[in-house]
Image (cartoon, rainbow, N blue to C red):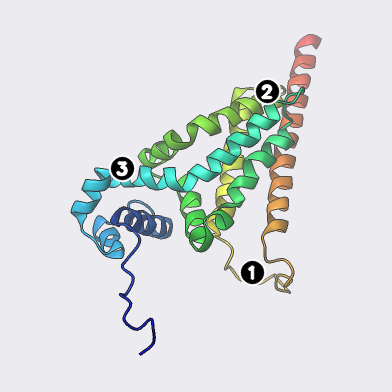
């Protein structure tokens, strides 16, 4: 017998609450909110429905807790970066705002370690969730930070009206959520002739492409709207 043979077997260190949140992150991301039953959640977490009511009050309460936990680090980093940008003498540019918003979102996988892919899939699923009640729950949890970005983007794009700024912002959210969800990561496109190079597995290149694509699209939209307004002004003046 070794010196360690008589040591007790370590007990489960994760609490019931933590197991429920972990299971919800994984199952909500895979199946959606409506597609995940409380029974499936509690079976995955090795507990019972009473535990959901005790810790969270309801399935919606569990969802709020999951969003808060998964988004806290992202929101904190986005807030820090925006504070830093807004402390500069000049207002932040649209390009700087896009980078400050997108980079923390694409860092979800690294931030949450082994659970990172599940967390990224969950956040991507929430943004694209068809149920308006679920989308509102998500919006309520992130609005304090994301609302500031929407306002800052409006200042950075004076050529866009309110509707145009909101379109630019929601388009950024949509592209980011698609990237986070990994929806196309396993698709084998028949047109692809080669696989991704071994040296490009970190996602850094994809993140930079995403930032460039979003920034370019937003600036192009602002330019197009400014040109359209100028043509309309010229048309009215010529009458």
Q: Residue at x 47, y 59 (%)?
A: 118
Q: Nearer the viewer, residue 7 or 177?
A: 7
Circle count: 3
Residue matched to label 1? 189
**Callout 3: 10 Å neighbours few (<14), some, many (20+)?**
some
Number of the front mark, 1 or 2 = 2
- Label 3 secondary element: helix
Q: Residue at x 22, y 53 (%)?
A: 51
Residue matched to label 3? 61
Label located before the other in sequence (1 or 3): 3
Q: CA distance from mark 1 to mark 3?
A: 40 Å
Label located before the other in sequence (1 or 2): 2
Number of the front mark, 3 or 2 = 3
- Label 2 secondary element: helix
* Residue 78 picture location, percent across and down: 60, 38
Residue matched to label 2? 155
**Callout 1: 10 Å neighbours few (<14), some, many (20+)?**
few
| In the image, residue 98 above or below residue 22 | above
Report if residue 129 is visible in the image.
Answer: no
Report if residue 56 is visible in the image.
Answer: yes
**Callout 2: 10 Å neighbours few (<14), some, many (20+)?**
some
- Label 1 secondary element: loop
Contact (Cβ within 8 Å) of mark 1 with mark 3: no
Q: Pick out the residue farthest to the front.
A: 3
- Quarter-of-image position of residue 206: bottom right
- Quarter-of-image position of residue 64: top left
| In the image, residue 112 above or below residue 158 | below
Label located before the other in sequence (3 or 2): 3
Tell me if 157 is positioned left or right of 186 in this view. Answer: right
């Amino acid at each position: 017998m070794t010196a360690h043979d008589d040591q007790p077997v370590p007990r489960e260190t994760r609490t019931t609450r933590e197991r429920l949140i972990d299971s919800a992150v994984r199952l909500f991301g895979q199946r959606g909110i409506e597609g995940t039953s409380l029974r499936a959640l509690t079976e995955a977490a090795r507990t019972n429905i009473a535990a959901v009511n005790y810790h969270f009050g309801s399935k919606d309460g569990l969802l709020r807790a999951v969003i808060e936990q998964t988004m806290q680090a992202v929101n904190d980093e986005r807030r820090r970066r925006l504070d830093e940008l807004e402390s500069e003498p000049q207002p932040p540019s649209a390009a700087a705002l896009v980078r400050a918003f997108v980079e923390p979102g694409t860092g979800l996988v690294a931030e949450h370690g082994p659970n990172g892919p599940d967390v990224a899939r969950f956040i991507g699923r929430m943004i694209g969730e068809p149920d308006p009640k679920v989308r509102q729950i998500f919006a309520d949890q992130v609005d304090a930070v994301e609302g500031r970005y929407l306002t800052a983007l409006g200042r950075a794009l004076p050529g866009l009206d309110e509707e145009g700024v909101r379109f630019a912002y929601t388009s950024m959210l949509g592209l980011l959520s698609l990237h986070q969800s990994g929806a196309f990561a396993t698709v084998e496109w028949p047109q692809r002739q080669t696989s991704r190079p071994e040296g490009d597995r970190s996602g850094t290149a994809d993140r930079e492409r995403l930032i460039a694509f979003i920034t370019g699209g937003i600036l192009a939209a602002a330019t197009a709207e400014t040109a359209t307004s100028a043509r309309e002004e010229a048309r009215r003046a010529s009458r």
